[in-house]
Amino acid sequence: MMIHSQATQSDRLLLRIDRINKAYGGVQALQDVSFDVGRGEVHALCGENGAGKSTLIKLLTGVTRPDSGSLVMNQRALPVGNVRGCEAAGIAVLHQESTAFPDLNAIDNIFVGRELRVAGGLLLARDAMRREAAELLEQLGESIDLTVPLGQLPLAQRQMVSMARAMSCQCQLFIMDEPTASLSAQESQKMLALVKQLKEQGISILYVSHRLEEIFQIADSVTVLRDGQYVATHAVEDLHDRKLIQLMVGRELDELTVRQTVSQSKSDETQKPSTLKVDQLSRQGIFQDVSFSIAPGEIVGMAGLVGAGRSEIARAIFGIDPYDEGTVEVNGQMLPGGSVARAKHVGMAMVPEDRQHEGLVLPMSVQNNLTLANLRDLQDFGWLSQTRERGQAKRLIADLDIRVTDPQLPVETLSGGNQQKVVIGKWLASMPNLLILDEPTRGVDVAAKAQVHRLIRELADEGMATLIISSELSEILTLSDRILVIHQGRIAAEFEGATATQEQLLHAALVGSAS
Amino acid sequence: MTRSTRFMLLLLISLISLGCRTESGTNVGDRDKLTVCLLPKIKGIPYFTSCHTGAQEAAAELGDIELIYDGPIDGDPKEQAELIEQWIVDGVDVICIAPNAPLVVANAMKEARTAGIHVITWDADGVPESRSFFVNQATPESIGRGMVDVMIADVGPDQEGDVVIISSDATSANQNSWIDAMKPAIEESKLTLQTIKYPGENAANALADAQDLIKVYPNLKGIFGISSVSFPGAAEAVRQASKSGEIKVTGLAVPSEMKSYVDDGTVNSVVLWNTKDLGYLTVQVAKALAEGRLTDSDTSLNAGRLGEIQIEGDNVLLGDVMVFNKDNIDSF
Amino acid sequence: MNQPRAVARFNYWHELVLFGLLIGLLALAEYLSPGFLSLRGQLYLSRHLWVFAIMALSMTLIIIAGGIDLSVGSAMGLCAVAFGVTFEMTGQLHVAIIACLLTGVLGGLFNGALIARFNLHPLIVTLATYAAFRGMAEGISQGESYSQFGDRFSELSRATLLGIPLPGYLFFVLAVLVGLFLWRTPTGRSIYAIGHSAEAARFSGISVNRIRIRLYTFSGFLAGLATVIYVSRFDTAKADAGRGFELDVITAVVVGGTSIFGGRGTIVGTVLGLLLIHETRQFVGRYWQVDELKSIVVGVLLIVSVLIYQLLVTQRETRSH
Amino acid sequence: MTPNSKTETPAFARITTRREFGLAVLIALITIFVSFFDPRFLDAINLRDIIVRCAPTAIVACGMMLVIVTAEIDISVGSLMALTAAAMGIMLSENEWNLSLWIGLPATLMLGTAVGLLTGLLVTVGKVPSIIVTLGLLTALRGFTTLIMGGKNIDGLPPSLQHAAKQGFWGIPLSVWVAACVLVMTLVIIAWTPLGRRIFAFGSSRYAATMCGLSEKPLKLFVFAYTGFLTALATIVDVPRLPTIESGIGLEFELLVVTCVVVGGVSINGGRGTLLGVLLAVVLMTMIRPVLTYLEIGEEAEKWTKAIQGTLIAIAVIGDSLFRRRGRGESRS
């Protein structure tokens, strides 16, 4: 199964990942993954969301340990499950989520956990650290106020500090997880220049990014993961974006452009008043002039890069976040901003992106989670009816095929896919007529994903207006009647679901206009 | 969720059935002995500890008395009431209480009497109908006046000047009642009451307030420290400011606690009574009352080593406040 | 998940342990100090309980919702002064009672508004009002106490029906109502959700802020109600009413199994916690006659009860992985 | 925070939005106000008195600050102060065991540290929330102290100790010297040792700390033990200044210390706070009593003292969080 160009000289080989397995709950996050990273190369790691990239990074940095398999660095086994040990072995990481300490200044952020010391290790070598921090940041081409808490710095500068932290430990392998996801184009270019600079110093880089053009710009070789499995490793010269996308998606592109489920003709329904009408919605610095509408029974997909503002638009519509200008209208009723209760009242429902924190109350039982959003409908004279509550939970569990032995079990014991079905189910119970789904199948296994997709389609056929946000283009293409592409907080392009292609979407998401 | 319903019901039922033992209260301790409860305002301060010593002496002398000494460690009158109620259930024979706030404990005391327990007050009086006798060493009036008189004597009868009071909390019932007596007395004298400070039962605050008062009022002649914390605090402040003799400090305290300040002249006089005798007499009265030797009409009582003690109405008189100074403090 | 499921799923371990402890304590007490369990004595002494007990109900709700209220004791002081001042001005008992309750409600509303609207930490807000309420009470009343509310009012807290004091009935009615509310109403369920994850609750369309404000207002109201009983019982309305009660109330709630981090707890647990502390104090007071011991035993009981629970939970967790 | 503000914030604006600045201004205003009424407020002797009173609070606040920075709390310090005072009295008093200072003082310090360590162990190993552990200790230790003192006050501390606490060296009592040392020591811990940086790092983001491989237990054990140690130290240098050792020592001290730390700008959620802020808050809280005395507000107004204190706390804490809200809003969850 290993297609990668075997690096025969052992001194060319830096890291060998050998038959790694890792499962979370019931979900196999990584299955028999093996590949090598050579010395001094930029090795890109690609895959859709949920392909297992983040898990692999956690294993390499010692945050978690693999179920089986081995990790060998410089012909020595990595101390698995030991953060400091992995660091000592020469692995540094720039995490996707900020792992900075917001209340500490840049110097401390760079050195916490491996401080430079004097006086027999008792005291900090403050001057040395300051000097080194300044040097590091200068190398990175940043002038940052070293005394200000990091939380008060702009995002790009924070990123640079994290970068400096990673570089300060004389690493041989530098893992970068979506380093440009939240940076502007200009800042991204700077980051890429840095990567090249590091490579020239002989440091290997494991580069994770969704931005394909970046990969083609800097990577030497590319490894693709899909659904926790190793797919292929190629030299970057052997690839072009179409082929890479195809490897990631796992099917021929032509196959995908044909819609698998063609929804009923909506032409007669467009006369109906739209369920959701968003007009000129803006929030300073987040999104601008967003206008669109969704008709009953229509599924609108929202595509775009991470950080383009998709989730924020959805949150504003649902009333979680405030917005500055514009209007949201549901079934002809104007919604005041910032009230979830009102949104719920007019029949809106939202499956949030962060299932663990926003979608579910993890320690509560499955039943209680399933009924949390429509408790008021289950009351008799002010008291919750246990029979009706149990009935509703049972019905939803059956309808959505949630795999749980007992609805009284805490929802945190369920697998990701089943948890997601609980989140969707919780809203279905309130019989909404507008459903917003933010990354509905992230971290969900393939079988459950198909079930969720079928469910969404069925609901739409029953007349539900649906807005789907997804980073998985295939998902958007499969489901949507219409597709909006968001680029830097604006609607950059609109496609008909039936005719759009992944390339078109990617292009619009990356460049900001339809091709 | 029916499981939890059943569970709660079960809990409730078993709790109720547990409590259902209808035979009525038993008593603490030995039935042959007389159980006397001595309830101080605050447990754990030297004043009441020395009363307790006197009470123990009487109990040992009388032989057949089981003495219980308990009270709130924070001086909470609510807890005094709760202790009385506890003792009612225990079925003790006599409760002697030094009420911290007469009204708060009045109902409990009345109920104790209804339950056939003899109730007397000592150290401070309660609501009259709530007790049979009051072992009276001093009334708020005599304490307040006494302190002012001592101050006037210490400062010099014709001296003009400022005085201040350092009390306890603004809500302390005893201190407030003394202050009510002190104000007119100071009014009548040539002294001027400048202010009253409320440091609470906090020694550091009492010391701090006294220090500040000394600095703020240059014409300060005297400080009344009217709680067990503020008196030594005021004396210490005067001593540390090296104004011993210039500013007189007086107040209520167990003499032994103030001995070093009396010795070095910071404090001329300490107002108090013989605390051991107070505890002793209280137990004597309790015993006489329980045995029926003491009735409402009696005018005197033979109280062991104290001899014949006067009774005026329902007040058993220990004698008036005493003033301790350099000459007599060593004997207490 | 194939550990003994019935064991893991039983949600009332803490209550059961408390119940066992209570029985054990009562048995020990009766053995060491015969007559301890006499019904009459127990009912008579139950009057020590009601003022705390009533406030413990709202404290349970607040702590389940992930908050805390340090100001209830001071609020009682303020309510008592409001009661006294109003009675002195009008001479009307019912006006005084209404003023007392209203003061409590307003105080609670103030706490709640600061916590919810300005998103301040409840510990900080109530620490500030802890000092402010007490200070205002002392200033307004000038440290004086109000009394002479009449025998009928005083009788209110002392009268018994079938041997149980009237405030006891009030407490039981309130406890059952609050218990049912927590267990069986949408808002009750929401309170648990807020305690576990305020964010997830918000995403479910629960008005987190509105519920928080109402909880603190309810807490203030119960502080007012407790003050009425307190004033009736001790015939005195004074600024020092309820001093130190906040700690006693929190102790009872926590011993009763409510998690200080929110999300877990029941009224049954709180009632058991109240009883356990009450009986422990009774027993210690009766057996040793040393007031100092009461605070030592209650302090240790608080730590140990949570420690045992934590050990049980961590053990169960390690077993299931 | 606009993401494109690459330019540094002007130094002046940065200082004025800080808690320390607000506190300093408040202290200055109050000082000016009161010395306008009574210039003697600025007399050296009064300033000395205020500093002496600040000392014990400042000493313990140094430890409490670190505890709160790790997002824990310790409300047992008042009772611990009473316990260590009683222990010290019993060991050293000429009327009691009359031990040498060289035995008694280290033993007192060890007692304080041991209780702090016990708290830390219950929190880290026993997984009992710190507010519960210390609430339990708050009541238990107070009862225990009253019990071992047996209803008496303890006098007769060694004269050398009393002299050091009252007169001290070069006219400055020992407690002030010690407080200065403790402040420097704490500053060194915070700014110059890996330990201090890690304490702040841990409080700032538990998640990031785990990603860096920091472990929780040693940090928390240290902060609780340190607080216990400092409480004992404050007892040793401050209690001999008082007339006598009684069981009510340190009553509500925990509230004062926690209030100072919170008013001083240490975030109750952990991670944030400066020693300077805490120190200023200690000064502010300590100067309220003397200020009211110097203003000669009169007998009736004296009864409003607590209300004034409470309102001031409320204004300092609530007003400040409202003011600061505008500057933040990001990076915390």
Image: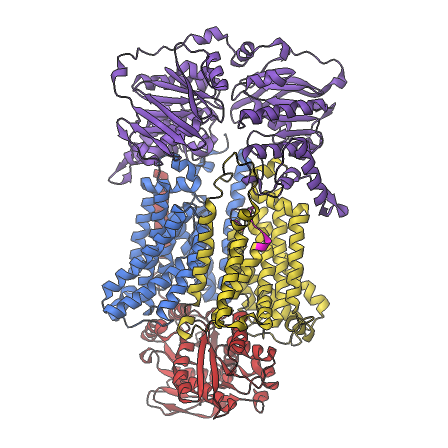
Chain colours: A purple, B red, C blue, D yellow
Q: Which residue lies furthest to the top in this view?
A: A254
Can you give x and y, in whole percent of width and height, for residue B320 in the image? Answer: 44, 89
Query: Magenta stretch: residue B117 in it?
Result: no
Could you tell me which quadrant the N terminus of chain B lies in? top left
Please state if D5 lies on the left or on the right of A455 as rendered: right
Residue C238 position by quadrant: bottom left
Up-down relation of residue B72 to residue A219 (above or below): below
Q: Is residue A409 visible?
A: no
Up-down relation of residue D281 to residue D240 (above or below): above
- Assign the magenta stretch its main secondary structure: loop
- Give me the residue at 60% from left, 19% from top: A45
Can you give x and y, in whole percent of width and height, for residue A254 in the image? Answer: 47, 6
- Give me the residue at 36% from left, 17% from top: A457
- Give me the residue at 36% from left, 15% from top: A481
**Which residue occupies the foreground of this view, A136 or B278?**
A136
Magenta stretch, residue numbers: D266-276
Can you give x and y, in whole percent of width and height, for residue A452 in the image? Answer: 41, 20
Up-down relation of residue C148 to residue D284 (above or below): below
Can you give x and y, in whole percent of width and height, for residue D312 in the image? Answer: 45, 60
**Which residue occupies the foreground of this view, A32 or A255?**
A255
Could you tell me which quadrant the C terminus of chain B lies in? bottom right
Residue A334 position by quadrant: top left
Please state if A486 lies on the left or on the right of A35 as rendered: left
Up-down relation of residue A60 to residue D146 (above or below): above
Q: Is residue B135 visible?
A: yes
**Which residue occupies the foreground of this view, A307 or B135?**
A307
